[in-house]
Image (spheres, helix red, strand yellow):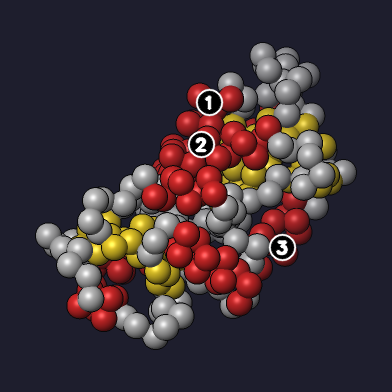
Amino acid sequence: MTPACPGAGVPGVILLAHGSRHRRAAAGINQLAAAVHRHTGRHTVAAHLSFHDHTFDHACHQLRSRGHTRATVVPLLFTNAYHHTIDVPNTVAKEDQLDITITPGLGTGPAVAELLRSQIPAGAHPILYAVGSSRPEANRSVEKLAHTIGGEPLFATRGTPTGRTLDDIRTTHHRVHILPLFVSHGLLLDQLRTHHPPTEHLSYSPPLMGKLATIVKRRLQCSSSSQAHSHN
Protein backbone atom coordinates (compact mmCIF):
# COMPACT_ATOMS: atom_id res chain seq x y z
CA MET A 1 0.00 0.00 0.00
CA THR A 2 1.28 3.46 -0.90
CA PRO A 3 1.64 5.58 2.26
CA ALA A 4 -0.53 8.67 2.29
CA CYS A 5 1.28 11.95 1.75
CA PRO A 6 0.75 14.93 4.03
CA GLY A 7 -2.47 16.63 2.99
CA ALA A 8 -3.93 13.47 1.46
CA GLY A 9 -7.04 13.88 3.62
CA VAL A 10 -7.87 17.07 1.75
CA PRO A 11 -9.24 16.62 -1.79
CA GLY A 12 -6.59 16.89 -4.46
CA VAL A 13 -7.08 19.42 -7.24
CA ILE A 14 -7.24 18.66 -10.95
CA LEU A 15 -7.04 21.61 -13.34
CA LEU A 16 -8.76 20.30 -16.45
CA ALA A 17 -7.72 22.19 -19.58
CA HIS A 18 -9.02 21.90 -23.12
CA GLY A 19 -5.61 20.94 -24.47
CA SER A 20 -3.64 22.35 -27.39
CA ARG A 21 -1.13 21.28 -30.02
CA HIS A 22 0.99 24.30 -29.12
CA ARG A 23 4.34 23.15 -27.78
CA ARG A 24 4.22 25.62 -24.86
CA ALA A 25 0.58 25.13 -23.89
CA ALA A 26 1.14 22.40 -21.31
CA ALA A 27 3.90 24.39 -19.62
CA GLY A 28 1.47 27.27 -19.11
CA ILE A 29 -1.08 24.98 -17.48
CA ASN A 30 1.64 23.53 -15.25
CA GLN A 31 2.60 27.08 -14.26
CA LEU A 32 -0.98 27.69 -13.17
CA ALA A 33 -1.06 24.39 -11.26
CA ALA A 34 2.10 25.39 -9.39
CA ALA A 35 0.59 28.79 -8.57
CA VAL A 36 -2.61 27.18 -7.27
CA HIS A 37 -0.54 24.87 -5.07
CA ARG A 38 1.32 27.89 -3.64
CA HIS A 39 -1.94 29.72 -2.98
CA THR A 40 -3.81 26.80 -1.42
CA GLY A 41 -1.24 24.29 -0.20
CA ARG A 42 -3.26 21.55 -1.91
CA HIS A 43 -1.85 18.91 -4.23
CA THR A 44 -2.65 20.27 -7.68
CA VAL A 45 -2.16 18.47 -10.99
CA ALA A 46 -2.90 19.43 -14.58
CA ALA A 47 -4.93 17.40 -17.04
CA HIS A 48 -5.92 17.91 -20.67
CA LEU A 49 -9.07 16.86 -22.50
CA SER A 50 -7.08 16.34 -25.70
CA PHE A 51 -3.73 16.77 -27.47
CA HIS A 52 -1.61 15.72 -24.48
CA ASP A 53 -0.66 12.51 -22.71
CA HIS A 54 -1.33 14.06 -19.29
CA THR A 55 -4.97 13.07 -19.50
CA PHE A 56 -7.64 13.16 -16.82
CA ASP A 57 -6.97 9.47 -16.12
CA HIS A 58 -3.29 10.27 -15.62
CA ALA A 59 -4.14 13.07 -13.17
CA CYS A 60 -6.45 10.79 -11.17
CA HIS A 61 -3.69 8.19 -10.98
CA GLN A 62 -1.28 10.86 -9.68
CA LEU A 63 -3.66 11.82 -6.89
CA ARG A 64 -4.48 8.23 -5.96
CA SER A 65 -0.76 7.45 -5.76
CA ARG A 66 -0.47 10.27 -3.19
CA GLY A 67 -3.18 8.67 -1.07
CA HIS A 68 -6.09 10.86 -2.12
CA THR A 69 -9.58 9.42 -2.21
CA ARG A 70 -11.26 12.69 -3.22
CA ALA A 71 -10.59 15.30 -5.88
CA THR A 72 -11.94 18.67 -6.94
CA VAL A 73 -11.93 19.33 -10.68
CA VAL A 74 -11.69 22.93 -11.89
CA PRO A 75 -12.47 23.23 -15.62
CA LEU A 76 -10.11 25.80 -17.14
CA LEU A 77 -12.84 27.05 -19.44
CA PHE A 78 -14.31 30.54 -19.63
CA THR A 79 -17.74 29.81 -21.13
CA ASN A 80 -20.45 27.17 -20.84
CA ALA A 81 -19.86 25.86 -24.32
CA TYR A 82 -19.61 22.26 -25.56
CA HIS A 83 -16.40 21.36 -23.77
CA HIS A 84 -17.77 22.55 -20.43
CA THR A 85 -21.24 21.04 -20.67
CA ILE A 86 -20.44 17.79 -22.50
CA ASP A 87 -16.72 16.93 -22.55
CA VAL A 88 -15.94 17.68 -18.91
CA PRO A 89 -18.80 15.71 -17.28
CA ASN A 90 -18.36 12.80 -19.71
CA THR A 91 -14.64 12.64 -18.96
CA VAL A 92 -15.11 12.87 -15.20
CA ALA A 93 -17.86 10.23 -15.23
CA LYS A 94 -15.33 7.59 -16.32
CA GLU A 95 -13.41 7.84 -13.03
CA ASP A 96 -14.79 5.37 -10.49
CA GLN A 97 -12.13 5.35 -7.77
CA LEU A 98 -12.01 8.98 -6.64
CA ASP A 99 -14.93 10.87 -5.14
CA ILE A 100 -14.99 13.88 -7.44
CA THR A 101 -16.57 17.33 -7.24
CA ILE A 102 -16.63 19.61 -10.29
CA THR A 103 -16.53 23.35 -9.69
CA PRO A 104 -17.85 25.98 -12.08
CA GLY A 105 -15.38 27.02 -14.75
CA LEU A 106 -13.35 30.22 -14.81
CA GLY A 107 -16.30 32.17 -16.16
CA THR A 108 -16.52 35.66 -17.62
CA GLY A 109 -17.58 37.45 -14.45
CA PRO A 110 -16.21 40.33 -12.38
CA ALA A 111 -13.05 38.52 -11.24
CA VAL A 112 -11.96 37.79 -14.81
CA ALA A 113 -12.93 41.31 -15.87
CA GLU A 114 -10.82 42.81 -13.08
CA LEU A 115 -7.85 40.67 -14.06
CA LEU A 116 -8.10 41.67 -17.72
CA ARG A 117 -8.67 45.34 -16.95
CA SER A 118 -5.46 45.44 -14.90
CA GLN A 119 -3.46 44.57 -18.03
CA ILE A 120 -4.73 47.33 -20.31
CA PRO A 121 -2.06 49.98 -20.98
CA ALA A 122 -3.12 53.57 -20.41
CA GLY A 123 -4.74 55.05 -23.49
CA ALA A 124 -5.10 51.75 -25.34
CA HIS A 125 -8.35 50.39 -26.74
CA PRO A 126 -8.72 46.78 -25.54
CA ILE A 127 -9.65 43.91 -27.83
CA LEU A 128 -10.69 40.71 -26.08
CA TYR A 129 -9.45 37.86 -28.27
CA ALA A 130 -11.24 34.54 -27.78
CA VAL A 131 -11.57 31.32 -29.74
CA GLY A 132 -15.33 31.55 -30.24
CA SER A 133 -18.05 28.93 -29.96
CA SER A 134 -20.84 27.42 -32.03
CA ARG A 135 -23.12 28.29 -29.11
CA PRO A 136 -24.39 31.89 -29.36
CA GLU A 137 -24.89 32.22 -25.60
CA ALA A 138 -21.20 31.42 -25.02
CA ASN A 139 -20.16 34.11 -27.49
CA ARG A 140 -22.54 36.59 -25.90
CA SER A 141 -20.88 36.07 -22.53
CA VAL A 142 -17.52 36.98 -24.09
CA GLU A 143 -19.05 40.01 -25.79
CA LYS A 144 -20.47 41.17 -22.46
CA LEU A 145 -17.06 40.71 -20.82
CA ALA A 146 -15.38 42.74 -23.57
CA HIS A 147 -17.85 45.58 -23.11
CA THR A 148 -17.42 45.43 -19.33
CA ILE A 149 -13.72 46.22 -19.69
CA GLY A 150 -14.40 49.00 -22.19
CA GLY A 151 -13.39 47.12 -25.31
CA GLU A 152 -14.78 44.87 -27.99
CA PRO A 153 -14.50 41.16 -28.77
CA LEU A 154 -12.63 39.47 -31.58
CA PHE A 155 -13.22 35.76 -32.15
CA ALA A 156 -10.60 33.63 -33.86
CA THR A 157 -13.27 31.48 -35.51
CA ARG A 158 -15.86 34.12 -36.41
CA GLY A 159 -14.36 37.62 -36.35
CA THR A 160 -16.28 40.38 -34.59
CA PRO A 161 -20.03 40.64 -33.97
CA THR A 162 -20.09 43.86 -36.01
CA GLY A 163 -18.11 42.44 -38.93
CA ARG A 164 -15.23 44.82 -38.33
CA THR A 165 -11.75 43.36 -38.78
CA LEU A 166 -8.79 44.11 -36.55
CA ASP A 167 -7.47 46.40 -39.29
CA ASP A 168 -10.79 48.26 -39.27
CA ILE A 169 -10.61 48.68 -35.50
CA ARG A 170 -7.06 49.98 -35.71
CA THR A 171 -8.08 52.76 -38.09
CA THR A 172 -10.37 54.21 -35.42
CA HIS A 173 -8.04 53.93 -32.43
CA HIS A 174 -4.54 55.32 -32.02
CA ARG A 175 -3.43 52.36 -29.93
CA VAL A 176 -4.96 48.90 -29.66
CA HIS A 177 -4.14 46.26 -27.06
CA ILE A 178 -4.98 42.57 -27.49
CA LEU A 179 -6.12 40.73 -24.36
CA PRO A 180 -6.13 36.97 -25.04
CA LEU A 181 -8.91 35.12 -23.25
CA PHE A 182 -6.55 32.16 -23.20
CA VAL A 183 -5.39 30.18 -20.18
CA SER A 184 -2.14 29.27 -21.93
CA HIS A 185 -0.39 29.52 -25.28
CA GLY A 186 -2.37 28.52 -28.36
CA LEU A 187 -1.90 28.19 -32.10
CA LEU A 188 -4.72 30.65 -32.81
CA LEU A 189 -3.02 33.28 -30.69
CA ASP A 190 0.26 32.70 -32.51
CA GLN A 191 -1.54 33.08 -35.84
CA LEU A 192 -2.97 36.44 -34.81
CA ARG A 193 0.46 37.70 -33.76
CA THR A 194 1.95 36.47 -37.04
CA HIS A 195 -0.65 38.28 -39.15
CA HIS A 196 -0.66 41.35 -36.90
CA PRO A 197 2.82 41.70 -35.33
CA PRO A 198 3.22 43.98 -32.31
CA THR A 199 4.05 47.58 -33.16
CA GLU A 200 4.14 50.91 -31.38
CA HIS A 201 0.37 51.06 -31.84
CA LEU A 202 -0.53 47.38 -31.37
CA SER A 203 0.42 45.47 -28.23
CA TYR A 204 -0.40 42.10 -26.69
CA SER A 205 -0.81 40.72 -23.19
CA PRO A 206 0.44 37.17 -22.65
CA PRO A 207 -1.97 34.32 -21.89
CA LEU A 208 -3.34 34.48 -18.35
CA MET A 209 -1.65 31.33 -16.97
CA GLY A 210 -0.57 31.80 -13.33
CA LYS A 211 -2.57 35.03 -12.98
CA LEU A 212 -5.69 32.86 -12.80
CA ALA A 213 -4.59 31.24 -9.52
CA THR A 214 -6.69 33.52 -7.31
CA ILE A 215 -9.79 32.79 -9.40
CA VAL A 216 -9.14 29.06 -9.18
CA LYS A 217 -8.69 29.43 -5.43
CA ARG A 218 -12.13 31.04 -5.18
CA ARG A 219 -13.64 28.17 -7.16
CA LEU A 220 -12.09 25.72 -4.72
CA GLN A 221 -13.38 27.66 -1.73
CA CYS A 222 -16.89 27.51 -3.18
CA SER A 223 -16.67 23.89 -4.31
CA SER A 224 -19.13 22.73 -1.65
CA SER A 225 -21.74 25.31 -2.64
CA SER A 226 -24.89 24.48 -4.58
CA GLN A 227 -23.19 25.55 -7.83
CA ALA A 228 -20.83 22.59 -7.68
CA HIS A 229 -22.00 19.07 -8.33
CA SER A 230 -20.60 15.71 -7.36
CA HIS A 231 -19.78 12.56 -9.25
CA ASN A 232 -19.55 9.10 -7.68
Q: Residues within 10 Å of mark 1 (few under 14, many from 20)?
A: few
Query: Which label belongs to residue 213?
Result: 2
Q: Are marks 1 and 2 in contact (CB under 8 Å)?
A: yes
Q: How many marks?
A: 3
Measured in 3D between alpha carbons, the distance from the residue under mark 3 to the one under mark 1, in whole angstroms, is: 28 Å
Q: Position of residue 41 (x, y in %)?
A: 58, 21
* Amino acid tagged 3: Thr
115 above or below 87?
A: above
Seen at 76% across and 20% down, the residue is 9
**Residue named by callout 3:** 85
Residue furthest to the left = 200
* Amino acid tagged 2: Ala
Q: Earlier in the sequence, mark 3 or mark 1?
A: 1
Q: Judging from the image, what secondary structure is the residue with disc 3 in?
A: helix
Measured in 3D between alpha carbons, the distance from the residue under mark 3 to the one under mark 2, in whole angstroms, is: 22 Å
* Residue 30, visible in the rendered structure: no
Seen at 68% across and 17% down, the residue is 7
170 above or below 179?
A: below
Q: Judging from the image, what secondary structure is the residue with disc 1 in?
A: helix
Q: Residues within 10 Å of mark 3 (few under 14, many from 20)?
A: few
Q: Earlier in the sequence, mark 3 or mark 2?
A: 3
Q: Position of residue 94 (x, y in %)?
A: 79, 52
Q: Judging from the image, what secondary structure is the residue with disc 2 in?
A: helix
**Residue named by callout 1:** 39
Q: Are marks 3 and 1 in contact (CB under 8 Å)?
A: no
